[in-house]
Image: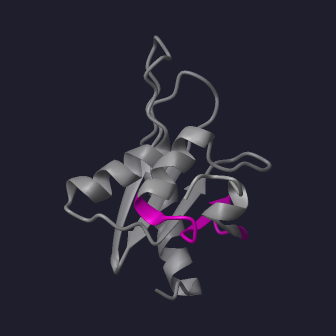
């Protein structure tokens, strides 16, 4: 599937909107949007006071996708007001599971700012495919 600028802009709008719903105990609100075919799904980080079961925004969005009956992640965009970041190893496990090594993973640090895009395999080049 070809992912164009309009797709990334749509993901950005959704991810920043969902970021506003984050439940944080720390300092970083994170939003996420997933593209599956022509459908989009959003998620946010939900922190738990005991910290052992926080839900990352990527897993929240992918869970929404799967709950809606979709099984293929084509692209994922993570947004947060941080200098630079990429998904953690646990979130990359989910991305590889539902999108594979060639799924597109983007991040954006400011609303309407530049989107940096990687293939999942660039973020974890030695992942067992």
Q: Residue furthest front?
A: 128
Across and down, in percent, residue 83 comes to 80, 48
Q: Residue furthest top?
A: 50
In the image, residue 97 sits, relative to residue 27, either above or below, namely below
Q: Residue 56: in sight, yes or no?
A: yes
Compared across the picture, whether 105 is left or right of 99 comes to right
Residue at 49% x, 38% y is 56
The segment highlighted magenta reads: 98-115
Q: Residue furthest right?
A: 83
Across and down, in percent, residue 59 comes to 43, 45
Residue at 55% x, 44% y is 30
Compared across the picture, whether 82 is left or right of 1 comes to right
Residue at 40% x, 59% y is 98
Does 36 lie within the magenta span? no
Q: Quadrant of residue 78?
A: bottom right
Q: Quadrant of residue 129?
A: bottom right
In the image, residue 45 sits, relative to residue 18, either above or below, namely above
Residue at 62% x, 41% y is 88
In the image, residue 93 sits, relative to residue 6, either above or below, namely above
In the image, residue 57 sits, relative to residue 48, either above or below, namely below
Across and down, in percent, residue 57 comes to 48, 44
Across and down, in percent, residue 32 comes to 49, 54
């Amino acid at each position: 599937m070809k992912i164009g600028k309009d797709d990334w802009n749509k993901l950005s709008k959704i991810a920043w909107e969902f970021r506003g719903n984050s439940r944080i105990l720390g300092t970083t609100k994170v939003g996420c949007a997933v593209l599956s075919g022509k459908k989009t799904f959003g998620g946010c980080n939900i922190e738990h006071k005991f910290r052992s079961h926080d839900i990352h925004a990527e897993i929240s969005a992918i869970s929404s996708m799967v709950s809606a009956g979709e099984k293929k992640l084509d692209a994922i965009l993570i947004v947060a007001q941080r200098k630079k970041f990429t998904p953690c190893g646990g979130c990359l496990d989910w991305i590889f599971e539902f999108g594979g090594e060639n799924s597109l993973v983007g991040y954006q640090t400011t609303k309407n700012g530049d989107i940096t895009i990687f293939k999942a395999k660039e973020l974890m080049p030695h992942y067992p495919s």
